[in-house]
Amino acid sequence: MNNQKIALITGANRGIGLEIAKQLGKQGITVLIGARDKSRGEAAAELLVKEGIAAHEITIDVTDETSVTQAAEKIAKEYGKLDILVNNAGISREQGLKPSETPLAAVRETYETNVFGAISVTNAMLPLIHKSEAGRIVNISSSMGSLNLAADPTSPSARLNLLAYDSSKAALNSVTLEYAKELRETPIKVNAADPGYVYGDRTAADGAKAATRLATLPSDGPSGTFQGEDGVVAW
């Protein structure tokens, strides 16, 4: 399996995560469908296998350190390395509440998945990514996390005001930069992807394009960037 590229996508049993897995799988990459629920992960993997993709379920709850550690141990045992990590698992719990009305518990829950979960998974998988000839880490962010766009009253991103979700994605962008700085002298590239407003005028397949591109960057590709389908997004 050493010559076969291996990709782990968290939250991959549906939506953008599943589409990222499909697009990577169609490039001949073995995809590991990360899901909290084993049966849902298996069902998603089976769908991809029917399309001729090498897909396998891996149970992982990004908010549970034991689950994350067990997933890393399983990947190490079965594949010996990890070429691509896509931190896709994410939640939003605000349901249209104003920032001043958002319960602190909802903010904490959002950060546990969107920020701390991404850090936990990255730290657990990094030793395996170092074993890849060209490791790639992609954090699924959002234009809602762009401070530049949020400060612009004419921007579509300024129309919504989600305290927990927006700030968690801004934090994830900062996390992306910190890992990119640490890994600057290695072949590993770390970037944040903006899928755009999926389920509005964009499909999940559209939303997966930026992440797929960043997950398969050539050796001269960028690191420490925030990009959408059409290129760089303002921090």
Image (spheres, grey):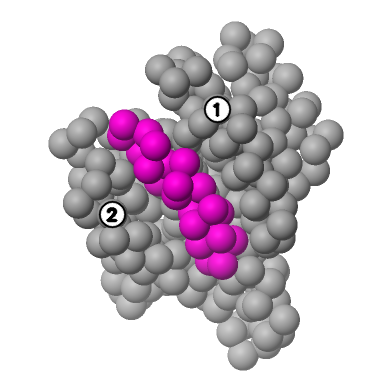
Q: Residue at x 20, y 33 (%)?
A: 219
Amino acid type at circle 2 is Leu
Per the image, the residue denoted by label 2 is 183
Nearer to us in this view, 25 or 141: 25
Name the image quarter holding residue 84. Answer: top left
Q: Position of residue 111 (x, y in %)?
A: 59, 71
Q: Neighbour class for label 1 at 10 Å: few (<14), some, many (≥20)? A: some
Does residue 135 lie above or below 87 as drawn? above
Q: CA distance from mark 1 to mark 2?
A: 22 Å
Where is the C terminus found, in terms of image quarters? bottom left
Left or right of 173, for residue 56: right
Left or right of 157, for residue 233: left
- Tell me the element at label 2: loop
- Residue 79: which numbered mark, if any? 1
Region of the chain picked out in magenta, as a range: 115-137
Q: Nearer the viewer, mark 1 or mark 2?
A: 1
Does residue 109 lie above or below 122 as drawn? below
Amino acid type at circle 1 is Tyr
Nearer to us in this view, 135 or 172: 135
The mark nearer the N terminus, 1 or 2, is: 1
Q: Is residue 122 magenta?
A: yes
Asked if one can make out residue 197 in the rendered structure from this viewpoint, the answer is no
The overriding secondary structure of the stretch rendered in magenta is helix
Q: Residue at x 40, y 66 (%)?
A: 175
Asked if one can make out residue 116 in the rendered structure from this viewpoint, the answer is yes
